[in-house]
């Protein structure tokens, strides 16, 4: 893709493909390798990266809702998944603001739907997992004076 993009968000040459993927929620196959400085206007983030999602955000939310309704899921897991659903809804309402803040949630579920299993929950709830970090820090994203709240 040889598209000249206007300057707004600056990605230095120290970013690799993953750095761009964090901003746009894509995978590395959707854009050329970053071997020099790249400038992106915030409106071009989603245009620059093609949408390679296998599942929509609504399908992901529906799957989490189905998991929550299962009697095998305890209250702690339900609360975490409800926070995740709220975060997914916030991200779908304000995708550019969430992208600029690097607080993606949908990115982690657009290729694989969540599953009902305790090990899966443990993985998502792990203190080092980006989903947990992004849920816990999504309130740092401000849109028109409003912040994300659960």
Image (cartoon, helix red, strand yellow):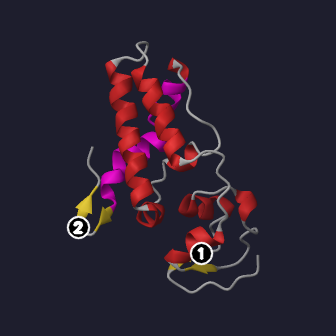
| Up-down relation of residue 39 to residue 107 (above or below) | below
Q: Which secondary structure is most common in the magenta stretch?
A: helix
| Residue 129 in sight in this render | no
Magenta-highlighted residues: 120-141
| Residue under pointer 1 | 12
**Image location of residue 4, percent across then percent down:** 67, 86
* Residue 15 position (above or below residue 27): below
Q: Point out residue 63 in the picture as x, y percentages from the top left corner.
A: 51, 32
Point out the tag, 2 or 1, that comes first from the N-terminus. 1
Reading the image, the residue beneath label 2 is 145
In the depicted structure, whether residue 123 falls above or below residue 9: above
Find the distance from the CA under tag 2 to the CA under tag 1: 29 Å
Q: Is residue 55 left or right of residue 136?
A: right
How many discs appear? 2
The quadrant of the picture occupied by the C terminus is top left
Q: Residue at x 54, y 63 (%)?
A: 23
- State yes or no: residue 129 in magenta: yes
Q: Position of residue 67 (x, y in %)?
A: 46, 25
How crowded is the residue under tag 1: few (<14 C-alpha within 10 Å), some, or many (20+)?
Answer: some
Quadrant assignment, res 49: bottom right
Which residue: 63% across, 57% down? Answer: 26
In this view, the residue farthest toward the left is 145
Task: Name the residue rendered at 62%, 66% in the picture.
Answer: 15
């Amino acid at each position: 893709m040889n598209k000249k993009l206007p300057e707004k968000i600056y990605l230095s040459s120290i970013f690799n493909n993953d750095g761009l993927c964090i901003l746009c929620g894509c995978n590395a196959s959707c854009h050329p390798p970053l071997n020099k400085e790249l400038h992106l206007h915030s409106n071009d983030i989603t245009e620059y990266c093609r949408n390679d999602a296998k599942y929509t955000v609504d399908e992901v939310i529906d799957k989490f809702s189905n998991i929550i309704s299962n009697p095998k899921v305890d209250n702690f897991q339900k609360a975490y998944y409800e926070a995740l659903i709220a975060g997914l809804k916030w991200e779908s309402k304000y995708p550019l603001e969430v992208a600029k803040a690097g607080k993606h949630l949908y990115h982690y579920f657009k290729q694989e739907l969540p599953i009902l299993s305790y090990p899966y929950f443990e993985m998502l709830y792990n203190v080092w997992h980006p989903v947990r970090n992004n849920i816990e820090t999504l309130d740092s994203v401000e849109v028109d004076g409003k912040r994300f709240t659960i």
